[in-house]
Amino acid sequence: MILGRVIGTITSTINHPFYEAKKLLIVEKTDAGGEPLADYLIAVDVVDAGVGERVLVLDEGNGGRQIFAAPDAPIRSVVVGIIDGVDEGRGESGEP
């Protein structure tokens, strides 16, 4: 899983049939504190995320195909959650 921030959307007039009616987002990878890393990815949105929101991205093709129940889909990255907050360095007991 990857933490990131949505920095834009992608619109295309011609694409693979799998991508019809699906929203593609440009996601800037971030560290746990929300600081940007020098990398980004393009992911299909399944949670209706918007520009500026922190998100959780599944970046593994087989998992993406399972989410869409499409075994032959040309997919790798899927936005699977919107992040409300990150608690760094805390275990189950709540202690660092």
Image (cartoon, rainbow, N blue to C red):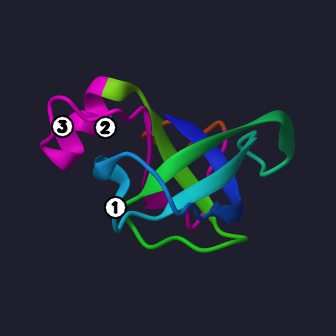
Residue at image location 29% in from the left, 49% down from the top: 18
Residue at image location 71% in from the left, 64% down from the top: 8
Q: How much space separates mark 2 and mark 3, taking CA atoms?
A: 5 Å
Q: Quadrant of the C terminus?
A: top right
Is residue 91 visible to us here?
Answer: yes
Which residue is the site of mark 3? 66
Pointers 1 and 3 in contact (C-beta within 8 Å): no
Residue 29 spot, x, y in % from top left = 72, 41
Q: How much space separates mark 1 and mark 3, taking CA atoms?
A: 18 Å
Q: Is residue 18 left or right of residue 11?
A: left
Task: Single out the mark in the foreground, 2 or 1.
Answer: 1
Which residue is the site of mark 2? 64
Name the amino acid, label 1. Glu
Residue 54 spot, x, y in % from top left = 64, 61
Q: How much space separates mark 2 and mark 1, taking CA atoms?
A: 16 Å
Residue at image location 66% in from the left, 53% down from the top: 26
The local secondary structure at tag 3 comes to helix
Pointers 2 and 3 in contact (C-beta within 8 Å): yes
Assess whether residue 85 is covered by the magenta stretch.
yes
Which residues, given as a range, are shown in magenta?
62-88
Name the amino acid, label 2. Gly
Residue at image location 56% in from the left, 68% down from the top: 84
Which residue is the site of mark 1? 20
Badge 3 crowding class, 10 Å Cα cut-off, few under 14, some 14 to 19, many 20 or more, is few
Sequence-wise, the earlier of marks 1 and 3 is: 1
